[in-house]
């Protein structure tokens, strides 16, 4: 058996309770994202204590929303008869894995709006800085999926392609599969690098937020090509509905970015691109665009 099929999902035990690698990677990704975001949010005069408060509000709400989304998508597995105490524990057992970013991000955004109302901060300017960093956290979290032997693609039968990271050995069915967790890890990492390169140079409100949405939905659309199973509804339609929706959302986000850049450059006569990085105080000036919060 290849080493990628011999990984253990449990890192260590505290008493009888195992601490999963999944939770360790997710936690590390969140803490790293908090540290980077705290440094970057100084341009909006946000203090470290305020960022910690944001973290303590957003993360629990996002995790709960992400778990609810995962349970809803897999309701037949969790809502069994009789629905007893063990079934309930299984439903909330996030320590065993099972979160969906498609619900986690909206849940976190809702909590972020509340934080912005409390501290009187611009919601869009804040998400422009924080959301691109979320791509880094998501990239790190994909290694938790690897340790759980999940988020893999279709079977790789060609022996010449049975090597990591092109494919990964899954012990559960004793076969090689496309290493989609690694594909998404690379794409998210690349997205973080690209948006990090641009965030200091493009002075357009909404650029980072829409950039994140466009990059992630494109990544999700690409990942849909490697899905192991298609539901019967999509099979009857003859196409992957999620994939189409992701492409449409990404296209709309990109179009919105272009429109915002043109608006600021041609209608307002303002600079959009700062080669050496735009002045910090620039981010503190009033913006003519309405605040989404």
Image (cartoon, grey):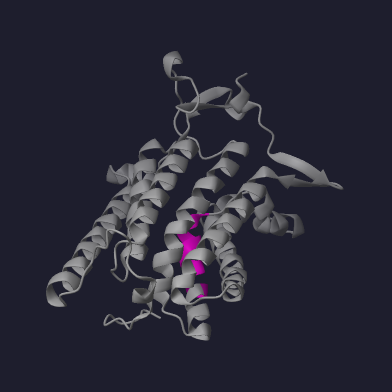
Q: What residue occupies the far right of the structure in this picture?
A: 15
Q: Is 253 on the left-hand or right-hand side of 40? A: left
Q: Is residue 218 left or right of residue 107?
A: left
Magenta: main secondary structure equals helix
Q: Position of residue 220 (x, y in %)?
A: 38, 48
- Residue nearer the viewer, 274 or 164: 274
- Whether 9 is drawn above or below 172: the answer is below
The x and y percentages for residue 55 are 59, 68
At x 81%, y 44%, the residue is: 13
32 with respect to 289 (left or right): right
Residue drawn at 76 percent across, 59 percent down: 85
Counting every numbered tag in the picture gives 0
| Residue under the image location 48 percent in, 37 percent down | 182
Expressed as whole percent of the image width and height from the top left, the position of residue 204 reads 28, 69
Can you give x and y, in whole percent of width and height, for residue 158 in the image?
42, 16
**Can residue 103 be found in the magenta stretch?**
yes
Quadrant of the image containing the C terminus: bottom left
- Magenta region, residue range: 100-111
Answer above or below: position of 24 versus 256. above
Q: Is residue 118 visible?
A: yes
**Residue 219 vs residue 77, the one in the foreground:** 219
Image quarter for residue 210? bottom left
Quadrant assignment for the N terminus: top right
Let me know if residue 82 appears in the view. Answer: no
Classify 58 as above or below 23: below
- Outermost residue toward the left? 266
Placement of 247 over or under 165, stated as above or below: below
Does the magenta portion include 248? no
């Amino acid at each position: 058996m290849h080493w990628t099929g011999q990984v253990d999902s449990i890192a260590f035990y505290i008493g009888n309770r195992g601490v999963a690698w999944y939770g360790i990677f997710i936690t590390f990704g969140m803490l790293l994202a908090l540290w980077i975001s705290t440094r970057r949010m100084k341009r909006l005069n946000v203090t470290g204590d305020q960022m910690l408060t944001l973290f303590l509000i957003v993360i629990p709400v996002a995790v709960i929303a992400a778990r609810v989304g995962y349970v809803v998508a897999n309701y037949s597995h969790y809502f069994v008869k009789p629905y007893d105490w063990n079934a309930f524990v299984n439903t909330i057992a996030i320590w065993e894995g099972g979160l969906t970013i498609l619900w986690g991000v909206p849940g976190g955004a809702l909590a972020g709006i509340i934080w912005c109302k409390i501290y009187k901060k611009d919601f869009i300017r804040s998400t422009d800085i924080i959301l691109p960093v979320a791509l880094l956290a998501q990239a790190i979290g994909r290694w938790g999926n690897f340790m759980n032997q999940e988020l893999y693609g279709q079977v790789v039968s060609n022996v010449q392609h049975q090597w990591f990271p092109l494919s990964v050995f899954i012990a559960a069915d004793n076969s090689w599969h496309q290493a989609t967790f690694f594909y998404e890890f690379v794409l998210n990492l690349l997205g973080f690098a690209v948006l990090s390169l641009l965030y200091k140079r493009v002075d357009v409100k909404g650029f980072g937020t829409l950039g994140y949405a466009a990059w992630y939905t494109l990544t999700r659309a690409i990942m849909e090509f490697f899905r192991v199973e298609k539901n019967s509804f999509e099979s009857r339609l003859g196409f992957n509905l999620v994939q189409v929706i992701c492409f449409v959302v990404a296209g709309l986000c990109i179009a919105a970015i272009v429109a915002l850049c043109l608006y600021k450059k041609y209608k307002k006569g303002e600079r959009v691109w700062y080669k050496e990085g735009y002045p910090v105080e620039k981010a503190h000036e009033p913006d003519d665009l309405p605040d989404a919060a």
